[in-house]
Each structure stands twice: as structure tokens, then as C-alpha cells.
Image (cartoon, rainbow, N blue to C red):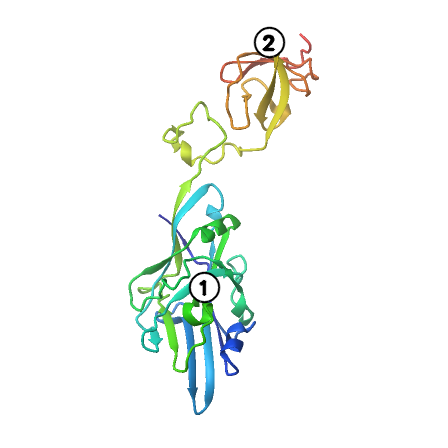
């Protein structure tokens, strides 16, 4: 399994006395906590207190950012999980409540390299869900390494090089259920890596998509190796794949579309000509006369080359034109 540690993680809180709605929908919070390393740190939180001194609502949201640029291309990502280390300090009241969470897209923390500010309290898009978000994900109250399953939408974020998530308390914050007086729901994390804690991290299967631009020296099978490297693990050869190009050529009275990779001027003996842009070498062996390009040192119709049954150029006009 591949793993990627969070580059940035932290929380933004907002406390207000006006109303639950005003607390939840605020564009700015009033406290931030960046990259905590404590062994018992409050990470998500919702409360509603009421008494002789008045009423107060508090919300804390957890933001985590991962740089996944190493897996942005060349891999199929599956089994994506977000790991964290909870503690036993969490709370869930009134009776019957649990610390359920929802996981959505974050727009904070830059390219996984910026600290949170109070202005990031609402830096998330809850229309882009990264987990089931159906009330089944619960922040555990214990000390066992735990995880949340992330979905295909989270996986698709890999192509942008950064996966950034925001974790919200589910019942009241994400679902906007007004908490009754006495509500206190919280989840705590252990981020002390010098002890038993962990930096939040992703775990996933990264399967190389491998070379998809035809055979390499007649090797096409995923289990075969080239210079000790499995074919399926090869993504590029000498900076190839590049853009496929083509020209028309006549051989034995038949016009063919000839495909090649790289610069036209670089074609010569031992270059390979292909029958399609997927790397097939099905051109019949013989002499070919390019009809639309200047190549092999000659203008169109005067240039020529001979290829073998593998598409390899064995001889060409090389400036000796119009044979």
C-alpha cells in the first residue's frame, strides 16, 4: 500500500452568541490551530451551552491537505483511506448522540503548503463529498489507529496533485440540525509522532498504468521486463510518449498512413514506422514513397525508405532522391 502524510492539518473554530445559524454560516471564525502535535487535541467540536450568562454555540472544523503529485499521473488509485489516531477524550451528549462526521472538499491550505486562517472557517464545498456522508462515519472514542473510507470523487482529486478535505460534525454542522441546549459532540486526535500519535495520512493502492504506446523492442506483456523493469511499470521511454504524427506514403500502389513519434527530421535508419497511433507495427515490409512531406533528405514523392516486417527502417533515400 502507498501512503502520503498530510502536509498541512489543523482546525478553525467559531464561537458566537447570536444564533446557531449565524455561528454555522459565518464566513470567518475566531480561532485557528495549525499542525498541532499534541497527544490529545480537540479536532471536531459542536456545542450549545445555555445558562444564566446567556447562550453560546461553538463549531470546530478539521482541515487536512495532502500533496499527491507523485501519483497524479501514471497510476490507478483504489482503496483510498484517511487514517487518524483518536483518543478517548471525546464526548457525545445528549444521551444517544455519537460523534458522526462528514468529509467534503476543502478549498483551504493552498497547494497543501499554507496555514489556516480564521477566514478559512467556510473554506469548503459541501456539495463535493469525499465519503459516504450518510451518518455511518463516526470519530471513534478510543486509542486505536482508525480510518475513514474515501470515495471515487476524492480519488479523482489526485489528478490535480492535491487532495484537501474538511471534516465536519455530521448531525448539526454538516446536516444543519439545530443542537439543543446541552449538546456537546467532540472528537480528539493524537498527533504526537514522538509518542504513539500519527500525522494524518492517506493509504491507498497505486497500480501503475504502465506504458500504453505500443511495444518496446517487441515487449508487450505486463509480466515481461525490460532492463529489469516490469513492462507495466514503464511510463516513459526517453521522454516518450510524445505526440503522434503521421504522413501518407505509397507502397506497391497502395497509399498508407504512416505514424511516427518524435520529429520528422529525426527519422532514419533503425527508426520505427507504425500502422496506427497505438503503436501497432502492421505495415507490410517493402519500399515506401512519402507523398506529403519532405523527409529522408528529399521532397515529397522523391523520398523513399525500406522497412522490414517490424516497421524498422533498414534503408532510406538519405538525400539521394527520386530513384
Mark 1 Cα-neighbour bin, 10 Å: few <14, some 14–19, many ≥20: many
Q: Position of residue 76 (x, y in %)?
A: 43, 43
Q: Position of residue 37 (x, y in %)?
A: 39, 67
Q: Position of residue 313 (x, y in %)?
A: 55, 16
Work out whether residue 30 can be spotted. Answer: no
Q: Is residue 221 above or below residue 93?
A: above
- Residue, x 36% and y 31% (percent of image)? 223
Looking at the image, the residue that sits furthest to the right is 299
Q: Is residue 72 above or below residue 179?
A: above
Front residue of this view, candidates 321 and 49: 49
Q: Position of residue 12 (x, y in %)?
A: 48, 71
Which residue matches tag 2?
252
Q: Nearer the viewer, mark 1 or mark 2?
A: 2
Front residue of this view, candidates 289 and 216: 289
Alpha carbon separation for disc pair 1 and 2: 67 Å
- Residue, x 56% and y 17% (percent of image)? 269
Which residue matches tag 1?
9
Quadrant showing the C terminus: top right
Answer left or right for 308 relative to 288: left
Q: Is residue 71 above or below residue 227?
A: below
Front residue of this view, candidates 267 and 280: 280
Q: Quadrant of residue 263?
A: top right
Q: Quadrant of residue 51?
A: bottom left
Answer left or right for 68 relative to 294: left
Looking at the image, the residue that sits furthest to the top is 323
Mark 2 Cα-neighbour bin, 10 Å: few <14, some 14–19, many ≥20: few
- SS category of the residue bearing label 1: strand
Q: Is residue 223 above or below residue 72?
A: above
- SS category of the residue bearing label 2: loop
- Residue, x 53% and y 82% (percent of image)? 18
Amino acid at each position: 500500500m502507498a501512503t502520503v502524510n498530510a502536509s498541512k492539518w489543523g482546525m478553525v473554530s467559531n464561537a458566537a452568541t447570536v444564533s446557531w445559524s449565524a455561528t454555522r454560516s459565518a464566513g470567518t471564525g475566531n480561532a485557528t490551530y495549525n499542525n498541532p502535535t499534541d497527544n490529545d487535541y480537540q479536532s471536531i467540536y459542536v456545542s450549545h451551552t445555555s445558562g444564566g450568562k446567556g447562550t453560546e454555540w461553538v463549531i470546530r472544523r478539521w482541515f487536512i491537505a495532502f500533496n499527491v503529485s507523485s501519483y497524479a499521473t501514471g497510476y490507478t488509485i483504489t482503496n483510498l483511506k484517511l487514517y487518524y489516531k483518536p483518543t478517548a477524550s471525546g464526548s457525545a451528549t445528549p444521551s444517544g448522540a455519537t460523534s458522526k462526521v462528514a468529509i467534503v472538499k476543502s478549498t483551504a491550505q493552498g497547494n497543501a503548503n499554507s496555514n489556516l486562517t480564521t477566514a478559512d472557517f467556510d473554506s469548503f464545498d459541501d456539495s463535493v463529498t469525499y465519503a459516504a456522508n450518510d451518518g455511518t462515519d463516526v470519530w471513534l472514542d478510543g486509542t486505536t489507529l482508525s480510518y475513514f473510507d474515501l470515495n471515487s470523487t476524492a480519488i479523482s482529486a489526485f489528478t490535480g496533485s492535491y487532495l484537501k478535505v474538511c471534516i465536519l460534525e455530521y448531525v448539526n454542522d454538516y446536516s444543519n440540525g439545530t443542537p439543543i441546549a446541552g449538546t456537546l459532540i467532540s472528537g480528539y486526535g493524537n498527533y504526537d509522532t514522538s509518542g504513539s500519535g500519527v500525522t494524518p495520512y492517506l493509504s491507498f493502492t497505486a497500480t501503475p498504468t504502465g506504458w500504453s504506446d505500443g511495444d518496446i523492442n517487441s515487449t508487450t506483456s505486463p509480466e515481461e521486463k525490460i532492463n529489469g523493469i516490469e513492462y507495466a511499470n514503464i511510463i516513459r521511454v526517453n521522454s516518450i510518449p510524445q505526440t503522434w504524427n503521421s504522413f501518407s506514403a505509397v507502397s506497391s500502389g497502395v497509399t498508407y498512413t504512416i505514424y511516427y513519434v518524435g520529429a520528422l527530421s529525426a527519422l532514419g535508419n533503425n527508426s520505427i514506422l507504425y500502422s496506427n497511433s497505438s503503436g501497432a507495427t502492421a505495415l507490410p515490409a517493402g519500399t515506401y514513397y512519402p507523398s506529403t512531406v519532405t523527409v529522408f533528405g528529399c521532397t515529397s514523392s522523391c523520398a523513399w525508405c525500406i522497412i522490414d516486417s517490424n516497421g524498422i527502417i533498414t534503408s532510406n533515400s538519405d538525400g539521394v532522391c527520386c530513384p
